[in-house]
Amino acid sequence: MKYSIHLLVIVSMAAVGAIFLTVNARSLDILPLSESHKARIVANCTSAKTSLQQLHRSDASLRVNRGQLYQSISTKLMARLNSRLALNRLDGSELVAAAARYERSLSQFRNSYQAYEEQLSALLRINCQKQPDEFYYRTLDVRERRQAVAQTITDLNHYSIEYHQIFERFSENYRTTPGMETE
């Protein structure tokens, strides 16, 4: 009993230590900015902020349009087809599983976009002429969060294609199964 408690404590401490080492290693990757780099940030501050504001506006409308499209695919296509198959007592379990993966990815898209939008808004509030270091490091964070959003979009596209492929197989099996009449 004592041995297992000691082992648990040691493993827990090792895990916590590994987490701290990972965080510290990541922060060591980011070197302090040189004076020339800071000067370039200050010199280009106005144009950078203008570009970021335009990006913020265009991303907001894209998010709304894509979000509505992804939601429609989920609720108007996948959910309706899956419920119709269930009502007709047809085995649509693969389609249901694919729709669940799509729905999880849609939720991740919303969360990723919200985190990205919050960080971009925070970046836009920074005075890059007075705080070039903070502006630069926030820009790196915003870039990472935007890449996370892009990855969720890739995932959503993948899952919608997967759903379509499963549907095609289901449809082909349905048409070729003896005793099944198609309209």
Image (tube, helix red, strand yellow):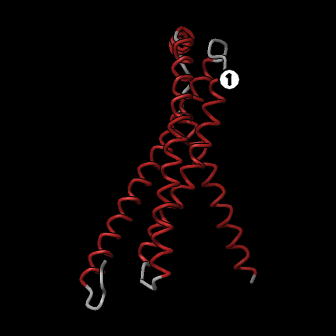
Q: Vertical placement of 120 versus 180: above or below? A: above
Residue that lies at the very extreme toward the bottom in this rendered image: 179
At mark 1, the secondary structure is helix
Work out whether residue 104 or residue 16 is closer to the camera in this orientation and state it: 104
Kindly indicate the quadrant of the structure image that contains residue 81.
bottom left
Q: Vertical placement of 106 versus 144: above or below? A: below
Residue 128 x %, y %: 62, 16
Residue that lies at the very extreme toward the front in this rendered image: 183
Work out whether residue 87 or residue 163 is closer to the camera in this orientation and state it: 87
Residue that lies at the very extreme toward the right in this rendered image: 2
The C terminus appears in which quarter of the rendering? bottom left
Residue sitting at x 64%, y 55%: 17
Residue 71 x %, y %: 53, 54
Across the whole image, how many numbered discs are drawn on residues? Answer: 1
Residue 122 x %, y %: 66, 29
Residue 132 x %, y %: 61, 17
Crowdedness of circle 1 by 10 Å Cα count: few (<14), some, many (20+)?
A: few
- The residue carrying mark 1 is 125
Q: Vertical placement of 124 versus 24: above or below? A: above
Kindly indicate the quadrant of the structure image that contains residue 174.
bottom left
